[in-house]
């Protein structure tokens, strides 16, 4: 055990945040999957053990990735990005459809499904970190600097948006933040934001006219968020029902919560172990538990920003801050949905919601951040040793 701890490098606070979030995930998933286990005729501990194995593999992925020198990801980024584009196209037309959206593909032989947008997010930010670091000298130039970083964002978001608009919007927003950090001119970022708005409106109109896409779902979710509780058939809609049950769970939780495993709304929420797991956490652990989760994500972001500030090379700095921003922003969006600050999006809570491939891709991203942190720590350690050596070495006597 001591040998493993000695070989584990990188930011210790981030490691601590990951372990605490994983522990919270185990408690929340075990509590919220009781009704699912009953419906599927499974033992009550079946989903706990399954989730435990997923998290254990995720921690192994983090450990393995963080041992890799982060500079190697500059070459891997190109391959991953070029691989993600055909996979997104294939998913859009031939992927597994759920709720009128084609987001998953099933891998043959091993029979495992995964969201290609998870791979695309990881690949895009690694690719952008590489280009931004290369183009720093000309980044304020429209054609030489900005266009090379703009095109990958537009292509990726355009391929994700028809089936998963919330993820595409999240990607676009976090890319704008990364561009601002990367010294892109504000007027160029504003043009990208305007183009994104027109793109979303155009996509909605085309989807509405052709019937291809999820325009009806997007429109309905906006109406639901605005207060419409019943559909055209007079029945209460699922999104409204989910939000209402989440509100009840939060109200039941109060300040300190009902206690571990004592949630009532887990029996009524359709997906209490994924999209709405945060409301179950608040019901069982109260506003105190909900605040702890928020603080953990913000602590992760703060430590990543410290890595960004300490990293001597642009690629590592952009890599750490880009991946951490998208992870934390997704978490904040999920929690905002649970407390009804934004319309229902379908985004999961990173490292907490039950899942397989989503947790593993998140683990890869965290491993990359820790890889950058490990290099920064080692680089600063070498500098400190060199400085101490210079101080201790006596100057040669003058002849």
Image: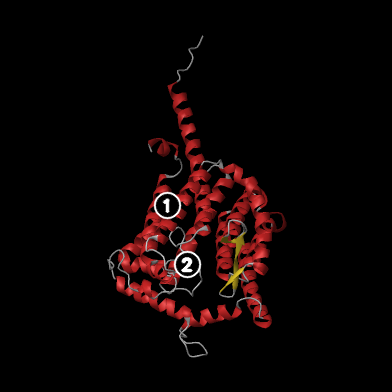
Q: Quadrant of residue 252?
A: bottom left
Give percent across and percent down for residue 131: 65, 51
Residue that numbered label 2 is attached to? 333
Q: Quadrant of residue 108?
A: bottom right
Give percent across and percent down for residue 280: 37, 68
Q: Residue at x 60, y 79 (%)?
A: 215
Give the crowd class for mark 1: few <14, some 14-19, many >=20 residues within 10 Å: many
Q: Residue 18's mark?
A: 1
State the residue in front, 182 or 282. 282
Q: Residue at x 40, y 51 (%)?
A: 19
Q: Residue 43's mark?
A: none
From this viewpoint, which residue is outermost toward the right?
Answer: 143
Q: Earlier in the sequence, mark 2 or mark 1?
A: 1
Q: Is residue 314 above or below residue 327?
A: above
Give percent across and percent down for residue 202: 66, 76
Q: Is residue 5 above or below residue 174?
A: above
What SS does tag 1 mark?
A: helix
Q: Residue at x 49, y 51 (%)?
A: 366
Give percent across and percent down for residue 346: 51, 70
């Amino acid at each position: 055990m001591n040998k493993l701890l000695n070989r584990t490098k990188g930011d210790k606070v981030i490691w601590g945040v990951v372990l605490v979030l994983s522990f919270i995930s185990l408690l929340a998933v075990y509590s919220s999957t009781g009704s699912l286990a009953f419906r599927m005729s499974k033992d009550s501990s079946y989903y706990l053990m399954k989730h435990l194995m997923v998290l254990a593999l995720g921690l192994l992925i983090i450990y393995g990735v963080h041992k890799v020198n982060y500079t190697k990801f500059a070459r891997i980024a190109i391959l991953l990005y070029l691989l993600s584009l055909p996979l997104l196209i294939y998913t859009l037309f031939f992927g597994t459809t759920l709720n009128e959206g084609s987001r998953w593909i099933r891998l043959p032989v091993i029979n495992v499904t995964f969201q290609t947008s998870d791979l695309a997010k990881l690949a895009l930010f690694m690719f952008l970190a590489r280009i931004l670091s290369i183009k720093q000298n000309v980044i304020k130039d429209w054609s030489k600097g900005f266009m090379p970083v703009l095109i990958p964002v537009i292509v990726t978001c355009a391929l994700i948006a028809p089936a998963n608009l919330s993820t595409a919007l999240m990607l676009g927003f976090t890319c704008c933040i990364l561009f601002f950090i990367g010294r892109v001119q504000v007027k160029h970022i504003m043009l990208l934001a305007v183009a994104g708005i027109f793109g979303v409106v155009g996509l909605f109109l085309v989807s509405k006219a052709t019937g291809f896409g999820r325009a009806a779902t997007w429109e309905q979710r906006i109406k639901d968020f605005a207060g419409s509780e019943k559909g055209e058939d007079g029945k209460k809609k699922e999104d409204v029902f989910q939000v209402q049950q989440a509100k009840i769970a939060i109200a039941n939780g109060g300040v300190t919560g009902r206690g571990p495993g004592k949630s009532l709304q887990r029996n009524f929420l359709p997906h209490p172990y994924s999209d709405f797991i945060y409301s179950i956490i608040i019901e069982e652990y109260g506003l105190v538990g909900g605040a702890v989760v928020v603080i953990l994500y913000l602590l992760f972001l703060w430590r990543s920003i410290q890595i960004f500030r300490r990293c001597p090379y642009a690629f590592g700095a952009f890599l750490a801050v880009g991946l951490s921003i998208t992870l934390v922003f997704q978490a904040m969006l999920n929690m905002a949905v649970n407390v009804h600050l934004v319309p229902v999006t379908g985004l999961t809570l990173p490292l907490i919601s039950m899942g397989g491939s989503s947790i593993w891709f998140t683990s890869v991203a965290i491993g990359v951040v820790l890889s950058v942190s490990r290099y920064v720590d080692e680089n600063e350690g070498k500098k400190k040793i060199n400085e101490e050596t210079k101080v201790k070495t006596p100057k040669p006597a003058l002849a």
